[in-house]
Image (cartoon, rainbow, N blue to C red):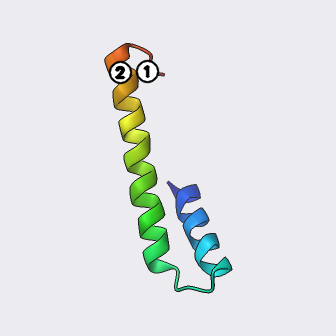
């Protein structure tokens, strides 16, 4: 999750924006995507 926050901050700095919203957005959607992927993996029996 820290790496997602770092990527959000890096993108904001690169785009000359305030980092708060991009960091929250990247972390939220990144965690959601990972959870969804893990859930699908459990359903089909291929979870790590």
Return the residue nearer the eye: 48 or 45.
45
Viewer-proximal residue among 40 and 31: 40
Circles 2 and 1: CB distance less than 8 Å? yes
x, y percent for residue 36: 36, 37
**Looking at the image, residue 29 lies above or below residue 40:** below
Mark 2: give few (<14), some (14-19) or many (20+) Cα within 10 Å.
few
In the figure, 31 relative to 41: above or below? below
Determine which residue is flagged by label 1.
Answer: 47
Circle 2 — which element? Answer: helix
Position of residue 35 measured from the top left corner of the image (x, y, whole percent): 37, 39
The furthest residue to the right: 14
The residue under the point 38% across, 13% down is: 45
Quarter where residue 28 is shown: bottom left
Label 2 vs 1, first from the N-terminus:
2
Left or right of 1: which side holds 10?
Answer: right
Q: Which residue lies furthest to the top in this view?
A: 45
- Element class at badge 1: loop
Q: Measuring 54% from the left and 58% from the top, which residue is drawn there?
A: 4
Q: How many angstroms separate mark 2 from mark 1 (CA)?
A: 5 Å
Residue occupying the point 62% across, 86% down: 16
Q: How crowded is mark 1: few (under 14 residues within 10 Å), some or many (20 or more)?
A: few
| Rendering coords of residue 1 (x, y %) | 49, 54
Which disc, if any, is residue 4? none
Rendered residue at 53%/64% (across/down): 5
Q: According to the image, label 2 marks what residue?
A: 42
Residue 30 x %, y %: 46, 52
Corner quadrant of residue 24: bottom left
> Where is 13 relative to 26, above or below?
below
Vertically, is 43 above or below 1?
above
């Amino acid at each position: 999750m820290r790496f997602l926050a770092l990527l959000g901050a890096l993108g904001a700095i690169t785009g000359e924006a305030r980092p708060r919203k991009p960091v929250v957005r990247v972390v939220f959607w990144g965690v959601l995507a990972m959870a969804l992927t893990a859930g699908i993996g459990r359903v089909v029996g291929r979870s790590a």
